[in-house]
Amino acid sequence: MSQVKKFTDIITIPQSRTTSWDTAEQIMAEEHHNIFPERVFKGHHDCIHNVAISSDGNYIATASDDKTAKIWNIHTGKEVLTCTGHVDIVFSVVFTPTKHRNNDSRLLYLVTGSYDSTAILWEVNLPHETATPIRTFKGHSGNISCVVVSIDDRYLITGSSDNTAKRWNLQTGEELQTFVGHTNFVTAIALSLDGRLLVTGSADDTAKLWDVEHYTVGKNPIVTFHGHSGGSIVMSITAVALSVDSKYLVTGAEDGTVILWDVDMGSEIRSFRHSVNSVNSIALSPNSCRYVITGSGDHTAKLWDLKTGKSIQRFVGHKHVVTSVAVSSDGQFLVTSSWDETASVWKMYVPDWKILPSSSPMMSHHPLVKKHSCTPQNRDGSQGKCVVS
């Protein structure tokens, strides 16, 4: 069961404010410039734990303690529908990466993970405003804390309080693999674009990198990352994110620290602290290793420049813990969720987002799996890469 306290107070959020800055460059020049929400989504009756954005950028989904997930129109703030079917807290939610299946623009698909130990694949009919559960994934012996779907819509990955992650066939519901190695809850997961590399974060103070294609039970992960804890104090890793070329990993922990890692070397590049409160979620800028967004127990989200380790924007408006952050695929919007029972959408003011075109090829094998790798292309067709120095 959840250890999160319930809220009965009426939540009030500041109205959206228009920035007085003329350009994104001016905004970036001001460290800790406060950004206020463009829109606030209200309708859940308990804490919201996770938020996701559809691939077309038109909808968001939220997962809540009230045992439901909701879908909202990101442009109007209207609640479109509620997914009802879990018998315990819905802790995680993700849209499938493919915009629509069967070329039917009326349909969306999403997956929810719950404390009832199941994940559900939903078919959402937008005109009818209905959500139909079409497949249930059962196999974990503990709460499902995180879910991710491969970019080709073939596989679902789930992380659980049973200390494992599992890979499933999204189309059939078949359990394909169980990743065993953590000694405490799996709290966060990230999957490479080609689906070959999986990162799991855990309450055992480690993140682990797995070779999905060749993993079998008993086989060690490629790399185990340590670094957040000091002395005998064990800090739960609460968030993980991989760069688009899988060369860099960012982890967040309950002590408020964020670490940027070189995946090839398994070594720390730099670290910084959001606050003294837990970092609960991390989102990297699309097709760029330059910026990262963190959501924290200090009621804010922050945008960081990874080259300097400095916070350059702060997203202010939530009245309680920020539990999740997500960035739209075009890099224009940030969406957050909170224990204050709301989600918010924010305009991003970053001058040099590098967007991954939908026509770009997925990356090849990572160097730790195979000796060569390539990186996604930029908009102009030139070869892209992530560089942090």
Image (cartoon, grey):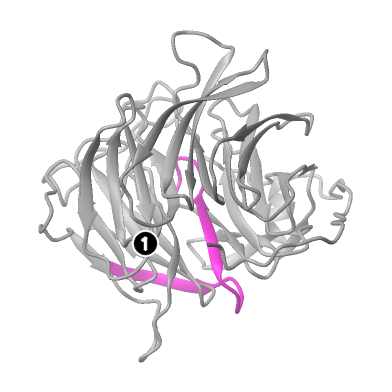
Indicate the quadrant where residue 185 lies. bottom left
Q: Does residue 362 lie above or below 204 as drawn? A: above
> Which residue shows up at 52% across the image and 9% down it?
104
Left or right? Give the position of 255 relative to 34. Answer: left
| Extreme residue in the top direction | 103
User: x, y percentage for residue 385?
Assistant: 35, 43
Nearer to me, 363 or 208 = 208
Farthest-out residue, front: 87
Can residue 61 be spotted in the picture? yes
Is residue 266 something that shows in the picture? no
Q: Is residue 317 magenta?
A: no
Left or right: 303 in relation to 380: right
> Badge 1, how many Cα within 10 Å: few under 14, some, many 20+?
many
Q: Is residue 275 left or right of residue 224?
A: right
Whether residue 141 is situated above or below residue 285 in the rendered picture: below
Q: Residue at x 27, y 66 (%)?
A: 182
- Percent across and percent down for residue 255 are 51, 77
Q: Position of residue 238 (x, y in %)?
A: 46, 64
Residue 84 screen position, x and y as percent: 60, 35
Q: How many marks?
A: 1
Q: Which residues are magenta?
A: 266-288
Furthest-bottom residue in view?
Answer: 231
Q: Please, what is the three-letter code of the amino acid marked with disc 1?
A: Gly
Say which element carries label 1: strand
User: For residue 332, which quarter of the picture?
Assistant: top right
In the image, what residue occupies the spot 79% across and 29% down? 76
Judging by the rendered image, the residue that carries numbered circle 1 is 201
* Residue 132 vs residue 350, the one in the foreground: 132
